[in-house]
Image (cartoon, grey):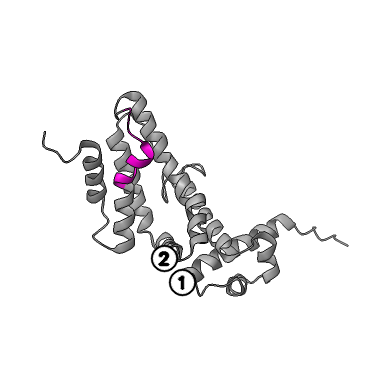
Amino acid sequence: MVKKPTPDASRRSEKSRRAIYEAALALVAENGYPRTTIEGIAARAGVGKQTIYRWWTSKADVLLDAFLDLAEQGARQSGEEPGEAAEVHGGIPDTGDLAADLKAVLRATVDGLLDPKFEAPSRALAAEGLVNEQLSRELVARLLEPQLQLYVHRLRSAQESGAVRPDIDPRIALELFVSPVAQRWLQHTGPLTYAYTDTLVDYALYGLAPR
């Protein structure tokens, strides 16, 4: 009698985790954050509620992990290592040309923000974050701030090379081009294009005063 192989518990757990991520992202895109529930995620994923509560304490935790996983998948597909994602895709290069490096990463940001699989859950989480302080804090701590620190690191490198004034605060300076992108994307105040982000970099680095 042939002995059946022992089920691989880790593989089964990973399959369940993947199903939960996909269900959470799909539901928040279809129904919005308030109408997405642990029960709904469990039913969509084909798992029990206890499986979800074994790994997460709330739907916010599920969705944040699902979105981080989605971002890491995008990084892998573009040939990067997990943890190098800036915004949705792409680490910030350091070629010695600060303007070119910033334009490159902001163009990748545009691609990510307009990618349907990222855009729907991003908008749902961002919208809920406006009225849900706890979720907003989680979004900032786990998603936004790590990404912004990549800009800080690149700007500090530019300071060391003399490309940026030594007295500027990189954390404030990055908002000159990152914040307008977020506003335009969130509020639809204009088209989100490469030309727009390139111009933001030029304005931020070279100023508005005549020379």
**Residue type at tag 1:** Gly
Density class for disc 1 (Cα within 10 Å; few <14, some 14-19, many ≥20) is: some
- Please check the rendered image and state whether residue 3 is part of the magenta-colored stretch, yes or no: no
Residue in front for this viewpoint, 148 or 68: 148
Q: Residue furthest right?
A: 1
Q: Amino acid at mark 2?
A: Ala
Return the residue nearer the eye: 14 or 106: 106
**Residue 70 in view of the camera:** no
First to last magenta residue range: 166-177
Q: Quadrant of residue 150?
A: top left
Secondary structure found at label 2 = helix
Q: Is residue 201 visible?
A: yes
Q: CA distance from mark 2 to mark 1?
A: 9 Å
Q: Is residue 207 left or right of residue 59?
A: left
Q: Quadrant of the C terminus?
A: top left
- Which labelled disc corresponds to residue 109? none
Question: Which residue bears the numbered disc 2?
Answer: 127
Q: Earlier in the sequence, mark 2 or mark 1?
A: 1
- Left or right for 196, reference 69: left
User: Where is residue 137 drawn, in percent x and y?
Assistant: 50, 55
Measuring 49% from the left and 47% from the top, which residue is drawn there?
A: 76
Q: Quadrant of residue 176?
A: top left
- Residue at mark 1: 32
Give me the residue at 38% from left, 34% from top.
154
Q: Can you say whether 32 is above or below 163 in the image?
A: below
- Direction left: furthest residue: 210
